[in-house]
Image (cartoon, helix red, strand yellow):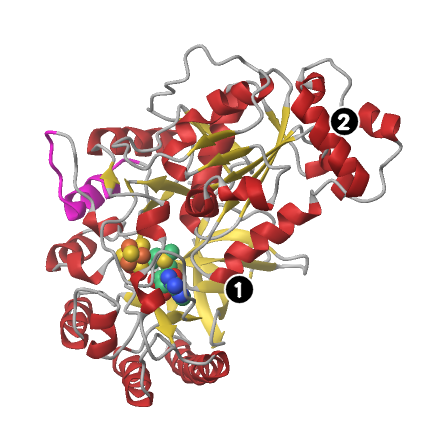
Amino acid sequence: MATGLPAGVTVETPGRSGQAGVPVRQGETFYLETFGCQMNDHDSEKVAGVLLARGYRQVENPEAAKVILYNTCSIREKAAQKVFSRLGELRPVGDAERRWMEERELGLRKADLEIGAPGEEESEQRAGRVKTRRLQSTGKIIGVLGCVAQQEGEGIFERAPWVSLVCGSASYRKLPQLIAELEAGNRRVTGLDTDTDETFETEITRRDNPFRAYLTIIEGCDKACSYCVVPFTRGPERSRASGSILQEVRQLADAGYSEVQLLGQTVNSYADPSVTNMRFSELLTAVAEVPGIRRVRFTTSHPRDFGKDIVEAIDAHPTICDHVHLPVQSGATAVLRAMTRTYSREEYLEKIALMKAAKRPISITTDIIVGFPGETEKDFEETLSLLDEVQYDSVFAFKYSPRPNTPSLKMPDAIPEDEKGRRLAILMDRQREIQRLQNEKLVGETFEVLVDGKSRRENQWSGHTSSNRIMNFTSPEQELLGDYVQVKVTSALPNSLVGEMVGR
Ligand code: SAM
Ligand code: SF4
């Protein structure tokens, strides 16, 4: 079935708005930029859905928006810095900044926020101060969402006084209410609770990917890895009821989506809060059996909760994709203990063995941190030997980044930055070679590909295999986007396959 949907599809979702009494803002504009992981991307789809449901219109650049929102990531220091540099671009300059602050204090700026009142264009002309992109932020609502918001809290107002909204992911359902409070004249509002047992279900989700629909099934994380901010920024684990998930999957299938990806920081720690009490592997199976669904993906799995039942579900249902992302973080048990990862190298390898024993080949990918405090050269070599042993199909590798509030911040024997860089480069070289050899073995094989891209070059298309490999291929056909086609691999690169379409 052709599933090509226009970008920006809006799909109604079985959720509760909880926003009774919040004013509709017909025609009001918002700009939303997202940093970080797929979970943030999907949260942004839901934030957009919540605002669209209130009559807002999404615009493509901050200059054109009344409300500017950054959905942020703080997993590593660089990611958090990026957000503050973006906020710096919106800083009112010099005198203008002072005047803006004073006017805001006196409530004069409130008028700028009303529909029909002099907008930013007029107030900018009035002040004759349009010099850089920065000034154009005057009179707008600027909000920081996501992990940086949760982590820095009201401290963001100190660092960037032109920000008026700070809201963590556990409070997104309150967003329209918070924006309404600003419009009513409040200077600053925050949504920073994490002690909610609600998941962020919305009436409407604005989906940006026309081929793959994301669904968060579990929010937060209870694992407490010693280097990680997620338990602080996303709060405790909360799972969504299986009935509500399945209802949304059925609606997605009706809307033309054939591929869904179940999301969670530790997706396989899913604990159904409803009486149905489905295990994660049962939920996978139930999603795979929804008519119209041809591919089910899930990420990220935690090794502790990864069991044989998940592999059995993959074996029993070709609809469940043959790809598992199972972050290891280090190949040395001593480092894993210091990271509080709850498994040893040997226990992790037992999970890998479960997958290698599956009836069909399962593509395995992972995350690795190099340069964790106290990581010796020997520990690092154990990580390299783990790469050789597992033969991952792809690795996301990071230099350890010390993060606020995390236990590893105070650990001794920090590794110097240049040494972290050296280890990262060695690891990536080793893995690139593994991938080159792995992919070369696939030359001559034929895979089903969901076509999700068209090159400007004639007859060139791209898509993903069930194992999530990127396939660039040739086909003389005119329209393939959203179709499932058979592609024979003709050559291989470390990060992608090259092929030609041989059938449908
Ligand atoms: N929940 C997933 C898990 O259990 O592996 C990972 C979520 S995290 C958003 C994605 C990856 O970021 C982690 O697997 C880890 O490799 C990396 N990461 C997390 N904290 C980090 C830190 N402080 N420094 C460097 N990398 C980090
Ligand atoms: Fe962070 Fe560990 Fe939770 Fe993953 S499992 S989100 S790395 S605390």
In the visual, does 207 lie left or right of 474?
left
- Indicate which disc residue 390 carries: none
- Residue at mark 2: 120
Q: Looking at the image, how many numbered discs can be counted on the residues?
A: 2
Q: Nearer the viewer, residue 495 or 31?
A: 31
Query: Above or below — where is 82 with respect to 109?
Result: below
Q: Could you say which is closer to the camera, residue 480 or residue 246?
A: 246
Q: Quadrant of residue 19?
A: top left
Task: Verify whether residue 285 appears in magenta.
Answer: yes
Residue 50 or residue 434, whichever sits in front: 50
Q: Please name the residue that numbered disc 1 is placed on.
A: 472
Report x, y in % for residue 224.
Answer: 25, 56
Instruction: Measure how far apart labels 1 and 2 are at the Cα level.
Output: 46 Å
Whether 126 is drawn above or below 315: the answer is above
Q: Residue furthest top?
A: 21
- Select label 1 or label 2 by which is in front: 2
- Category of crowding for the residue at label 2, using alpha-carbon neighbours closer than 10 angstroms: few (below 14), some (14–19), many (at least 20): many
Q: Is residue 447 visible?
A: no
Q: Which residues are magenta?
A: 275-291
Q: Quadrant of ligand 2?
A: bottom left
Residue at 42%, 34% in the rendered image: 256
Q: Is mark 2 within 8 Å of ligand 1?
A: no
Q: Where residue 410 sits: x, y (%)?
A: 33, 67
